[in-house]
Image (tube, rainbow, N blue to C red):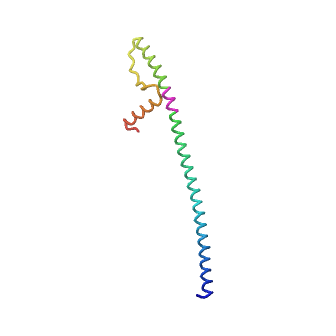
């Protein structure tokens, strides 16, 4: 091999090395950008889940307030019904009472009821 051929071969190898470095740099940059985009998507989805959980918490707090209202109204209605009976009236029957005083048990009972009715 002549000196000129070796020099040309060395130039080709050097150019290949430069091209490979460029491809590697581009690959690392694209990987970094994709990682950032995926991180952003992950954070958005995480925030969506947090909002869903907060909405569930809000609804459970509303359910707790409704349970308290139901129990209070039921007690008042039971007293009113008894007074009507004492006065000789024949009032209609009371609505169903809630099974227990614990909000968690009542919500669990209601979920089972709704499942049985095919509503959940």
Residue 84 lies, in percent from the top left, at: 42, 14
In the picture, which quadrant includes the C terminus? top left
**Relative to the observer, which residue lies in front, 106 or 83?**
106
Q: Who is closer to the viewer here, 43 or 62? A: 43
71 versus 117 height, above or below? above
Residue at the extreme bottom of the image, as rendered:
2
Q: Residue at x 43, y 33 (%)?
A: 108
* Residue 3 percent across, percent down from the top left: 62, 87
Magenta span dominant secondary structure: helix
Left or right: where 49 falls relative to 118: right
| Residue 64 among magenta residues | yes
Q: Residue furthest top?
A: 87
Q: Quadrant of residue 92?
A: top left
Instruction: Name the residue rendered at 60%, 79% in the picture.
Output: 12
Total marks in image: 0
Q: Is residue 49 magenta?
A: no
The residue drawn where x is 52% and y is 36% is 57
- Quarter of the rendering occupied by the N terminus: bottom right
Toward which corner of the image does residue 87 lie, by quadrant?
A: top left
Q: Say if 61 sits above or below 16 in the image.
A: above
Residue toward you, 24 or 112: 24
- Identify the magenta region: 61-68
> Residue 42: x and y, percent?
55, 51
In the image, residue 67 lies at what x, y percent? Answer: 48, 28
Residue found 59% across the figure and 71% down from its top: 20
């Amino acid at each position: 091999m002549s000196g000129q051929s070796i020099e040309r071969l060395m130039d080709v190898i050097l150019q290949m090395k430069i091209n490979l470095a460029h491809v590697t740099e581009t690959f690392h940059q694209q990987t970094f950008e994709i990682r950032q985009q995926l991180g952003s998507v992950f954070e958005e989805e995480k925030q969506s889940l947090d909002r869903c959980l907060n909405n569930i918490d809000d609804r459970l707090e509303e359910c707790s307030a409704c349970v308290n209202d139901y129990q209070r109204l039921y007690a008042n209605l039971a007293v009113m019904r008894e007074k009507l009976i004492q006065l000789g009236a024949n009032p209609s029957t009371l609505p169903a009472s809630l099974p227990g005083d614990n909000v968690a048990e009542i919500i669990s009972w209601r979920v089972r009821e709704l499942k049985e009715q095919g509503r959940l």
